[in-house]
Image (cartoon, helix red, strand yellow):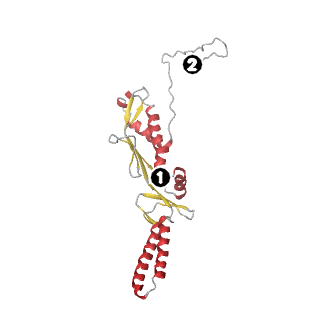
Amino acid sequence: MFGLILGIVLVIGAFVIRAMFKAQELRPFRGIASGVVGLLGIVAVGWGAFNYNDAGYCQHIRTIFGTETNTCNTGWYFAGWGKTTAWPHEITVAHTDGATGESTFTAFTGSIMSPYRVRLADNWVGDVTQTTRFAIPQDSEQFLTMARKFRSPERLINTTLRPAVTASLDSVANMFTMEEYYAGGKRDQFKSEYKDAVEKGRARVRQTSFNEAGVNITRVAPSDSNVSQDTSDV
């Protein structure tokens, strides 16, 4: 928008220069000055009308004419003197040993954090390192729906992707004990369960107690009234 206004001002300035300097001796200066100013005005107008999309990014484009489009192709595109937001084709959410602080964004490509602490089924705790990559939709309709809902890659990461990763890690960790993970050889199963949790949704985890002696145990409610009797078996 600023480029459009600046370009219009410069083009008008070129006509003003030609109108003001009418003397014969000033004609060479008038021609050069008006030409330079007019050329700068045209460049300024064109600079705001077009932008360049780098490889590996999609652009969410809102023009001053009220239109909303997107492009995922590398090269120049019509921006319409409006506002554009760059979205990477893939967003990474990682917990690594080399991260410092709560979260670090890396040039709009994702979020890098320190290892995430989980609690296993037997109440042991452990630190998890992981790297998860999410591909954004490049279909025009799906992309615009996502861009309107989240408005920026940072908001998508903070409100959806990062919570999905940590919740999936917590859910999968509740399915294993520390002994199963280290001695039972279930590290690969942990990875598979985590992948399924992120792609298909988290599994419901319910702990069930069994009486190995085969005797039914009846729990009696604190009250002796018939209404509050509890005859459920454990």
Crowd class of label 2 (few under 14; some 14 to 19; many from 20; radius 10 Å): few
Q: Residue furthest bottom?
A: 24
Q: Quadrant of the C terminus?
A: top right
Looking at the image, residue 234 lies above or below residue 77: above
Vertical placement of residue 129 versus 210, above or below: below
Q: Secondary structure at mark 2?
A: loop
Residue at the image point whose x is 46% and y is 79% from the top = 17
For badge 2, the amino acid type reads Asp
Amino acid at circle 1: Ile
Q: Where residue 13 appears, x then y in whole percent?
A: 47, 75
- Is 115 left or right of 72, judged from the image as shown? left
Q: Looking at the image, tell me whether mark 2 or mark 1 is earlier in sequence order.
A: 1
Q: Position of residue 182 (x, y in %)?
A: 35, 30
Q: Which residue is mark 2?
A: 233
| Rendered residue at 39%/82% (across/down) | 29
Labels 2 & 1 near each other (Cβ < 8 A):
no
Which of the numbered marks, if any, corresponds to residue 21? none
15 on left or right of 100: right
Farthest residue in the top direction?
A: 224
Q: Which residue is mark 1?
A: 136
Determine the secondary structure under disc 1.
loop
